[in-house]
Amino acid sequence: MIRRSKYPTPPTSPASSQSTTPPTPTPAAPAKCPVILNASNLAALLNKNPYTNRGDAFLAAWKSSDKKSYYDAHNRNGVETIEHRRREIQKASPFITANIRAPKPQFMDVMSSGKVPAIFDTHTDRAEFHTESSFSNTEVMKEAKRLAFTRYGTEREICIIERVRDILPEYDFHHREDEIVRREIGTTTEGFPIVLQGKVDGMSADGKTILECKTRMHKLFMKLREYEALQTTAYLELFPEATQAVLTEAYFGSNESPDINIIFIPRGGQDWKTVALGVGEALAWILSREHLQDALVKSKNKTILVQHLVTRALDAKGPPPPE
């Protein structure tokens, strides 16, 4: 026999009598994704790079910060991304496929002779740049030149570092294997961390001096250019223990060993952080507001729109509302 005992029900307060279900805990607010600023693009983000426009640099920072919203916005508005267009140009161009992307492209021998290949001159009506697609010869030439110069510089990086080691043996510079370093430099008014990231070409044995290599195509400039100074001082920000940077410009000409010019850059030589934080603030608005994403993606002049957003951020005016 099972004996069931009855226990008196304890008195309940009016509040507890309404529900016996424990309250659901309030979920924690989702973490804000960091706003990523690439040190290599810093000068362009500050509108100080004569070779890269601010609009393209801002798009690159958006993609680095949040790929999903970047691609979603382009898909939502039926706009092709820069990356997709570049890939399509590369696939459509027999010249790029057979030469620049080949394991040992012929153009490298020409560039190693101290000459920029004639195909990269201003005459874009050359047969090399013709495709069966709708891409113009100018587009194909620009993409071919971008790929060629990037590859040329990358493949000569080790040689430059070895040359610097010969001249400055006391630093014992070593190559850094594409190691990306990140450091938070601020927070937006809405709580987004602003993170600077980048990778340097070399580092001294004691970690006090970073090395940045620049391959010149025609000659040594023999002076520090503003956009390269900004990039290099941004790299110094990533390494608090470093006290200086060595920027080395190299020109190979027809030689295997380059002529080089070494420029020492001390820490603290450039006041860039205020504007960089303004760029981070403006980028955070893009990450969190679809109407601004759509406006940027569809804009015919992205540089002007970015300038407007950064100015509002620096003036603490807040993001523009939807129209």
Image (tube, grey):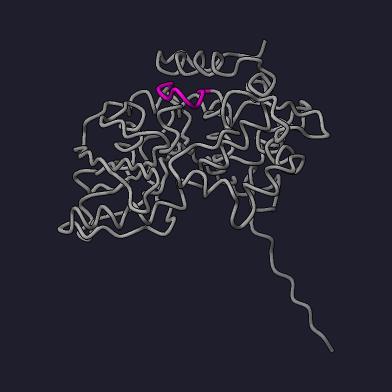
Q: Is residue 1 above or below residue 99?
A: below
Give coordinates of residue 252: x percent, y percent. 37, 45
Going 35% across and 34% down the picture, which residue do you hit? 219
Q: Is residue 322 above or below residue 213?
A: above
Give coordinates of residue 209: x percent, y percent. 22, 50
Q: In this image, 127 relative to 50: left or right?
A: right
Q: Residue furthest left?
A: 170
Viewer-side residue, 258 vs 80: 258
Going 50% across and 36% down the picture, which residue do you hit? 116
Q: Is residue 254 above or below residue 4?
A: above
Task: Find the magenta span and give its range.
Answer: 47-54
Q: Residue furthest top?
A: 323
Q: In this image, 260 relative to 29: left or right?
A: left
Give coordinates of residue 300: x percent, y percent. 66, 15
Going 66% across and 38% down the picture, which residue do you hit? 83
Magenta-colored segment: predominant secondary structure: loop
Viewer-side residue, 161 vs 118: 118
Q: Is residue 172 one of those drawn in magenta?
A: no
Q: Is residue 53 one of those drawn in magenta?
A: yes
Give coordinates of residue 173: x percent, y percent. 26, 57
Going 62% across and 47% down the picture, which residue do you hit? 100
Viewer-side residue, 89 vs 181: 89
